[in-house]
Amino acid sequence: MITFFRKFFQSKVGIALTLVFLAIIALAFASMDVANTGMFGGVAGGDRVAVVGDRRISTSDLTENVNSAVRQARGQNPQLTTEQFVEAGGLQDVLDQIINRAAIAEFANRLGLRAGDRLVDSEIMGLPAFQGPGGSFSEDAFRGALRQQGLSESTVREDLRMGLYARQLLIPMSYGATMPDSIARRYAGFINETRVGRAVALPALLFAPDGEPSDDQLTAYYDNNRARYRRPERRTIRYASFGPDAVGDLPAITEQQIANRYRRDAELYAAREQRSFTQLVVPTQAAAQAVIDEVRGGVSLESSAQAKGLATASIEDQERQAYASQASQAVAQAAFEADEGALVGPVRGSLGWYVLRVDDVQQIAGRSLAQVSGEIRESLTAEQRRAALNDLTERLEDELADGRSLSEVARELGVDIENTRPLTAQGQVYGTTESAPDELARVIPSAFEMNEGDPQLAEIVPGQRFLVFDVGDITPSAVAPLAEIRDLAVAQWRRDRGMAAAGEAAARILQRMKNGQTMAQAVAAEDVRIPPPQNLSLDREQLAQQQVLTRADILFFNMAEGSAKRVKLDRTPAWFVVELDEIRPGEPADQQQLAGFAQQLSGAAGNEYIQQFVAAARNGLDVETNQAAIDAVRAQLTNRGQ
């Protein structure tokens, strides 16, 4: 419920949470989703869109990050185009994020913080995107991922370096932030409040004209609403999909290859120890010692942390070197030398002072070559097929760019070419409620930007499924002739006239209420027979449970006590008159609920500290932007640079 209302009111809490997500999580490896952007047309890759202190942000940085953001947004809206994203303000938002990232890194560097190559190496080795089937870092997987995304190693390393700076600077900012119970109680009262009033609906249908419009009226209505009757552009798509089977039979993995891999990954198969911890990080040694004293006095580590507005973290199945890369060598040494159940700390690490409880110790026996031979064979076979598939897709991409046709590629791969019915840019089959095949969802935006006879290759399931596609027939967008949509135009004319009359009736009802009549009396005074008002008694929890909120719902929970207002609902279509009699403040159900509110608000306060710090760091640096370069990138991304 509390999450719902943060989103609902777009509060500073939500803004701060968004910022910390962007600055810490997305920053850590956002560029793994970056598309290969190719050439920049008239914009040289070395041009600068901004300078933050001594750090320069190039046009290629901005373009890559916008493409990354578009790809992520398409996870929620597969039909989103780059142009739509940019026009909605996405480019400026991305630029602000990049500048904030650069400001954090520059500020950290000036404070003397460092993120060296070895620390970046450990981050790379721990990323799932770079791990092979066995769960360990794979050089082949690393290089293959870079090739697929069109990235250089230096780009990836720099993104990770800035993420490490952000961890060191931003995470400690939120520790120790607390919100007093008095504010939590006020917030609980707001969340649990109940509103009492009434509402009346004035459907457009009750006020719509009975007869049809004259030809002149209908023609005038059609001319004034031509955009409403514009038929979308439609395109058919020809496509052929393929996967790992397209590479055919490959040479069998040899025993020598298996032995070589076993030697290379000897650490992976050697005997090792894994430990699980409950971890708390605080900003000072004194704070850490206070927690330890409380725990030794009988308080649990979790309870001690919660009382201070903090939260512990569960660290599962860690090996010593991996944990050292996350915390520090000193923290890992103390954690792995302690007995199971022991309390460790305070020890200084990368994020502050660590307090740990050793929850579990597992001794994992080593495995011989004979024991893992089958596993290694499977891993090498998968890597071999993945590399062959990468080589195939790279070759096909080059050949398509040189003029090879979709039919020729399909014939080589031994796959059939599929043809869609006319589709809209939203992925709908035109004139029906059906959608395009699921496998086309990722390529439809590109299909509506490409020319006929210019086939392209797309990856639809990373590393597993690919698509070669082309555009068939293109039907341009155009306004439908009135003769073909006359019935629809008449129905909409009647609805619009009815909505206008209903709005006038709502205004009259409000005026009568201001003059002292009750809502029921004001409604009864209308010539049209309107359904009687309905009494309302709703709390915010009931509101949160509604799957769809109307403007009337939102208005009811934003009105002043004792007021009455009207609101238009186009989808219904109807006007509503809403009256709010009383707001009854709520109370938390119990002390546990109040404590929960206090903890969540404390977390939000910590995030606001982060937001303020990032703004201060940015304001404390010389930040210059190059509007001409930004406009050039905008033109390139929206295909206006020709």
Image (cartoon, rainbow, N blue to C red):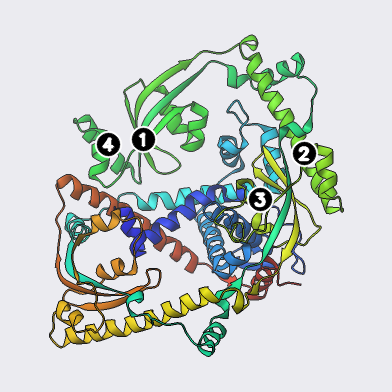
| Amino acid at dot 4 | Glu
Q: Are marks 3 and 2 in contact (CB under 8 Å)?
A: no
Give the number of the disc on residue 155.
3
Given residues 551 and 341, the one toward you in this image is 551
Q: Are marks 4 and 3 in contact (CB under 8 Å)?
A: no
Question: What distance separates the C-alpha of mark 2 from that of mark 4?
Answer: 58 Å
- Image location of residue 230, percent across then percent down: 60, 74
Question: What distance separates the C-alpha of mark 4 from that of mark 3?
Answer: 39 Å
User: Does residue 56 show up?
Assistant: no
Q: Which numbered disc flags the more N-terminal residue, 1 or 2?
A: 1
Give the residue number, with chain letter if any, for mark 1: 279
| Amino acid at dot 2 | Val
Residue at the (15%, 58%) spot, across then down: 586
**How many numbered marks have been drawn onto this rendered protein structure?**
4
| Amino acid at dot 3 | Thr
Question: What distance separates the C-alpha of mark 1 from that of mark 2?
Answer: 54 Å
* Quadrant that contains the C terminus: bottom right
Q: Which numbered disc flags the more N-terminal residue, 3 or 1?
A: 3
Residue at the (54%, 48%) spot, across then down: 28
Give the number of the disc on residue 302.
4
Mark 4 crowd level (few <14, some 14–19, many ≥20, 10 Å Cα): some
Q: Secondary structure at mark 1?
A: strand
Give the residue number, with chain letter if any, for mark 2: 415
Side (left or right) of 194 relative to 156: left
Q: Which numbered disc flags the more N-terminal residue, 3 or 2?
A: 3
Mark 3 crowd level (few <14, some 14–19, many ≥20, 10 Å Cα): some
Question: Would you place residue 378 above or below residue 538 in this image?
Answer: above
User: Does residue 41 show up?
Assistant: yes
| Amino acid at dot 1 | Gln
- Image location of residue 139, percent across then percent down: 68, 33
Question: What distance separates the C-alpha of mark 3 from that of mark 2?
Answer: 37 Å
Side (left or right) of 439 relative to 251: left
